[in-house]
Amino acid sequence: MFSEQVGWPDEVDEVFSGDLTAAAAYVTPAGGAVVTSVCPLGIDQRETREVGFTTSLGFPRKLERIIADPGVALAYHARDHGFSASPLFVLAQGSAAVDIRPSRERIAAIVPQATRFAGEPVRGPVWDRLLREYYYERVFVDITVRRVAAWPNLSASGEPQIYGPAWPGPPSEQTPPRNGTGPRVDMDRAAGRIGMLPHRVLAYRGADGFPVVLPIQLAGHDAAGLRLVAAQGLLPPGGRRAGLLAHAYHPQLVGIVTRTFTGWLQVADDGTALYAPHTARGFVAPPRKKLLLAVNGLSAKYGLWHARRQGTADRLQKLAAQRGSTRNEGNTSK
């Protein structure tokens, strides 16, 4: 992977600092990609060429994979309920460092941004105790940007403007999995759930090792898989492992529906794309703020309890130290 940091213009900076959600992708040991939705909270340190997001120790597998292979991507693919009115689809690729134990100062510094995007925190003796882990036990993923691709519209059609190294050619085909490439989940159910959600992106490992995240549409399905449509030239020909994300969200992220899949993508020479899901996961958050916060608070408590019981933080810290992909600077974001 290349090592130079890159800058970006004002129109891209508006997207980084204004979008309520982004699609975060990382690669798997088998050469696939997993893509999930995150709230980047406007983390945009233009002066140091960094973007990022926060997550929880309750998701150790994601953190382990990012630490093991720090090439990641953030796709800013939806303008709903944020602060940017830009038409651009923006993909930031870079190298991640994980701040597993951020300082109290860093946690405090992100509160104004969290309030801007997610609303005023609910306070009171009971709420403070319930939400302590949710608000204050966070992990930061800091991404040093190596390339930015900005397409002129959210469908990513047309020629992108590239900031940094030139866009690589298509990646080579991958070896099919031993268990076959066909679907392993109920296709009617998967298609029905994806079809109900307005935002959909697909992720795969690019030719230079960084994940590529691109918008797709569902054009039907059958027993062989999901028929996908993307802007001309976006999907690489041949077969490969890929991840798919479909989701919806309301203002301040009160009410979220997320469906994530891993599977096999097959793209014919004529651009016809077939996606066969192998795994499926879903998450639905209630559309009422206090109920949502109660669920998040309890989930965070359980996740942190489990992480401490399993020694997750120490294990991740050691892995990060071995890989050289940790950070404990207490730095703040824009």
Image (cartoon, grey):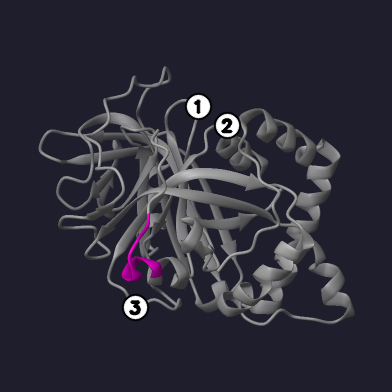
Q: Say the numbered circle drawn on residue 68.
A: 2
- Secondary structure of the residue carrying numbered label 1: loop
- Residue assigned mark 3: 85
The residue under the point 78% across, 62% down is 104
C-beta proximity under 8 Å, tags 2 and 1: yes
- Is residue 156 rendered to the left or right of residue 17? left
Nearer-the-camera pick, 33 or 274: 33
Relative to 213, say whether 47 is above or below.
Answer: below
- Residue assigned mark 1: 29
- Secondary structure of the residue carrying numbered label 2: helix
Q: Which of marks 2 and 3 is nearer the N terminus?
A: 2
Residue type at mark 3 is Ala
- Is residue 226 rendered to the left or right of residue 317? left
Residue type at mark 1 is Pro
Percent across and percent down for residue 107 are 72, 64
Q: Which of marks 1 and 3 is nearer the N terminus?
A: 1
Q: Quadrant of the C terminus?
A: bottom right
Q: Give the range drawn in magenta.
A: 7-13
